[in-house]
Image (cartoon, coloured by chain):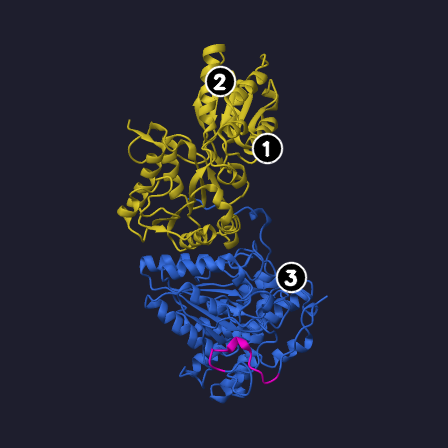
């Protein structure tokens, strides 16, 4: 199976859909001749021309609104947020318009729109370039929200996103653009609403999404090698729709759960997962559900401060030990 | 407390119609007084459209249809307030005073294919694009038959996919970027459609306005930005909204023409929007049209406009009611006589009564459907 970087896999999905469907257009800052500030659109301008690869003014609300209009008129626009942090400028268009237009048209209008870009931290860009917005966007009915972490999934989920008739918030693991993985040839759309069991195990469920999945997989290997504990790792990957079944099935098997996320704890995805487990798998639990989250500070710039602000492998290991009633 | 309000000065030209050569005040005024506030001087770059003349060569049948729609819009609007005040509708927001501008604009478009993105005062525009009195009463009374949303959205958020009326959000001006998108799609696909997006002068303060005009100018999009300047954003008068006379002056900053037109002069608006639509269809890009109007009613049924403007002021403006002005014009050019007028008015009265009756009899939405239409199925 071919090996690709996350970046290449992402691009290959968009290229394939643009080749297949001429209604797919792309808008964003510096996505044209420059190829995107993260080189996601490198070469697309030459390939598809300025009418379909649209370099925009620095006006997130304006170009997101334009994309909504395009979508209502039958195009399938993909908006690049240079980083998701800039999407706050477009929040009214995303939340008040894209997410509600279908409902407020009684089903007459569809908004087949993908908004994509790097999300999360870990690359020393400080707080105005560092947010994990899964919980924020996941809150709003009318949006679909996904957070793929492997090259395989970023391609498969982008194929699904572009074909979806609803607005899709596509949160890329910005720190992982250069990571490699196996990506099948051809068309393999990964459906939304299905979590991925990234590692099977029977002793404890480690639940994460985004770049924390890779950290959690390392911890799982460590637990197996050093303590004989077989952890099951769940990559949520689809935040809305949310796969409750896979989480519950896992916890009913392992009876213990740790949820890991980069975003802040309050009102977060991990809180949602923990609530789900206590509501629907309470009798299966042998320990309280643990949450490991980002610290309650804006993301700092200095490497050591940034590391201190995000979940560490040690914190995840400690949480697993608490859930396993092992000495921390 | 409201600040002191300056009254209209009879005979004085209002600055808004200043074209850079015509005196702002004095006997040479090109229009009767339309403004009551001293707006900033600023540089005036918009074109000022001349008043219309006679029937402007339009078939009298068309003129009568225009008149019927202005009068129907007024009648539906008044009925909305009545049912609200009678406690049968939670909310009303209206466009009384704007109707002529909207009908002038609508008839300048190709109503069989163009796209309109109205705002909440565009009752008349929406009627001209095919919504009916019954449709509107269904919205007002929150009935399942509301064509915009099945009573999920508030009234006056006009929408119909079939009629190419694109629904807008309550936060103002977000439809302006949408219009650049619909116009971009039309241009990309060569459909020849023009998009007309409406907003008030208050809405022109928002970033959405700037960002939409900027984007439209860059791509020379077939879009008309149609500002219905009624002098007040809820209570805030124009001179506290902007430091310039004309919203249309801003077009210069985006690389396309701005035109100011008397929004009480239906045929003048028609001429201006026709020229803008022709220009858009020729591929020459957007136009910003500013129709100067006046809002006769409070902002909404939840607003008391006596706190910020005097009844005398409203009365003075009602003397220039566009409905009456258009009626007088049509009589003058021989397009309307007593008999026809009686017939039209009678028809409207029954139409509005029947629409109200039908909407009052119609069912509310089935409560079990409250969560339908959140997501599209594949």
The x, y position of residue A50, in whole percent, is 31, 52
Image depth: mark 1 or mark 2 in front: 1
Q: Label 2 marks which chain's residue?
A: A
> Dot 2, crowdedness within 10 Å: few (<14), some or many (≥20)?
many
Picture coordinates of residue B205 (x, y %)?
A: 54, 61
- Circle 3 marks a residue in which chain? B
Between circles 2 and 3, the one closer to the viewer is 2
Q: What is the quadrant of residue B306 in the picture?
A: bottom right
Q: Which residue is mark 2?
A: A231
Numbered disc 2: secondary structure = strand
Q: Colour of chain A?
A: yellow
Asked if A212 appears above or below B29 in the picture, the reply is: above
Q: Do pointers 1 and 2 mark residues of a single chain? A: yes
> Is residue B215 shown to the viewer in this render?
yes
Instruction: Please identify, in this view, whether the residue under mark 3 or under mark 1 is nearer the observer.
Output: 1
Decide: few, some or many residues near mark 1? Use Cα within 10 Å; few <14, some 14-19, many ≥20: few
Q: Gap in Å between the C-alphas at discs 2 and 3?
A: 59 Å
Q: Is residue B373 magenta?
A: no
Residue corresponding to mark 3: B89
Quadrant containing the N terminus of chain B in the rendered view: bottom right
Spatial separation of the CA atoms under disc 3 and disc 1: 46 Å
What segment is highlighted magenta in the picture? B10-22
Q: Are marks 1 and 2 in contact (CB under 8 Å)?
A: no
* SS for callout 1: loop
Find residue A160 and report its image quarter.
top left
Reading the image, the residue beneath label 1 is A296
Which residue occupies the foreground of this view, B202 or B265?
B202
Q: Colour of chain B?
A: blue
- The answer to whether tags 2 and 3 share a subunit is no
Q: Quadrant of the C terminus of chain B?
A: top left
């Amino acid at each position: 199976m071919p090996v690709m970087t996350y970046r290449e896999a992402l691009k290959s999905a968009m290229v394939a859909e643009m080749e297949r469907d001429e209604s797919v257009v792309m808008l964003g800052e510096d996505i044209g001749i420059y190829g995107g500030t993260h080189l996601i659109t490198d070469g697309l301008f030459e390939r598809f021309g300025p009418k379909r690869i649209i370099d925009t003014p620095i006006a997130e609300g304006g170009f997101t609104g334009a994309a909504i209009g395009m979508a209502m008129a039958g195009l399938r626009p993909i908006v690049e947020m240079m980083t998701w942090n800039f999407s706050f400028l477009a929040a009214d268009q995303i939340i008040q318009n894209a997410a509600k237009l279908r409902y407020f048209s009684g089903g007459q209008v569809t908004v087949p729109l993908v908004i994509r870009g790097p999300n999360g931290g870990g690359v020393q860009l400080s707080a105005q370039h560092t947010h994990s917005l899964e919980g924020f966007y996941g809150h709003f009915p009318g949006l679909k929200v996904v957070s793929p972490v492997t090259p395989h999934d970023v391609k498969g989920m982008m194929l699904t996103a572009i074909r979806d008739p609803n607005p899709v918030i596509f949160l890329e693991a910005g720190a992982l653009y250069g990571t490699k993985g196996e990506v099948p040839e051809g068309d393999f759309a990964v459906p939304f609403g299905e979590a991925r069991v990234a590692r099977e195990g029977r002793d404890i469920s480690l639940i994460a999404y985004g770049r924390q999945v890779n950290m959690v997989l390392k911890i799982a290997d460590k637990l197996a090698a050093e303590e004989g504990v077989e952890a099951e790792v769940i990559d949520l990957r689809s935040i809305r729709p949310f796969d409750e079944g896979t989480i519950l099935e896992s916890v009913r098997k392992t009876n213990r759960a740790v949820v890991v996320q980069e975003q802040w704890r309050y009102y977060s995805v991990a809180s949602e997962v923990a609530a789900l487990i206590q509501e629907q798998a309470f009798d299966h639990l042998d320990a309280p559900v643990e949450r490991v989250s980002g610290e309650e500070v804006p993301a700092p710039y200095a490497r050591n401060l940034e590391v201190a602000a995000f979940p560490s492998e040690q914190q995840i290991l400690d949480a697993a030990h608490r859930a396993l009633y092992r000495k921390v | 407390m409201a600040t002191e309000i300056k009254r209209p000065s009879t005979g004085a030209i209002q600055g808004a119609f200043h074209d850079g050569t015509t005196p702002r005040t004095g006997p040479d005024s090109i229009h009767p007084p339309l403004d009551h506030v001293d707006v900033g001087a600023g540089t005036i770059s918009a074109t000022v459209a001349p008043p219309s003349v006679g029937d402007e060569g339009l078939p009298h049948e068309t003129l009568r249809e225009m008149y019927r729609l202005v009068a129907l819009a007024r009648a539906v609007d008044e009925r909305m307030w009545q049912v609200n005040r009678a406690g049968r509708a939670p909310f009303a927001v209206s466009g009384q005073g704007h109707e002529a501008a909207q009908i002038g604009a609508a008839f300048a478009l190709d109503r069989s294919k163009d796209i309109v993105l109205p705002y909440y005062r565009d009752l008349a525009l929406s009627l001209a694009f095919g919504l009916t009195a019954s449709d509107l009463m269904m919205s007002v009374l929150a009935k399942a038959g509301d064509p915009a949303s099945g009573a999920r959205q508030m009234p006056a958020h006009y929408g119909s996919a079939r009629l190419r009326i694109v629904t807008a959000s309550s936060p103002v001006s977000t439809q302006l970027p949408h219009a650049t998108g619909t116009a971009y799609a039309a241009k990309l696909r060569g459909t020849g459609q023009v998009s007309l997006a409406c907003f008030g002068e208050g809405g022109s303060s928002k970033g959405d306005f700037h960002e939409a005009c900027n984007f439209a100018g860059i791509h020379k999009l077939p879009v008309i930005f149609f500002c219905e300047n009624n002098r007040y954003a809820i209570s805030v008068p124009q001179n506290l909204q902007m430091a310039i006379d004309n919203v249309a002056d801003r077009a210069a900053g985006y690389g396309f023409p701005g035109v100011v037109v008397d929004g009480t002069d239906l045929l003048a608006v028609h001429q201006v929007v026709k020229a803008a639509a022709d220009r858009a269809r020729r591929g020459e890009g957007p136009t910003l049209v500013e129709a100067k109007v006046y809002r006769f009613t409070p902002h909404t049924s939840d607003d008391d406009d006596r706190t910020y403007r005097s009844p005398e002021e409203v009365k003075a403006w009602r003397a220039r009611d566009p409905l009456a002005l258009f009626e007088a014009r049509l009589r003058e050019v021989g397009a309307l006589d007593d008999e026809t007028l009686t017939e039209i008015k009678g028809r409207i009265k029954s139409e509005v009564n029947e629409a109200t009756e039908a909407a009052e009899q119609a069912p509310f939405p089935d409560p079990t459907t409250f969560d339908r239409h959140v997501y599209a199925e594949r």
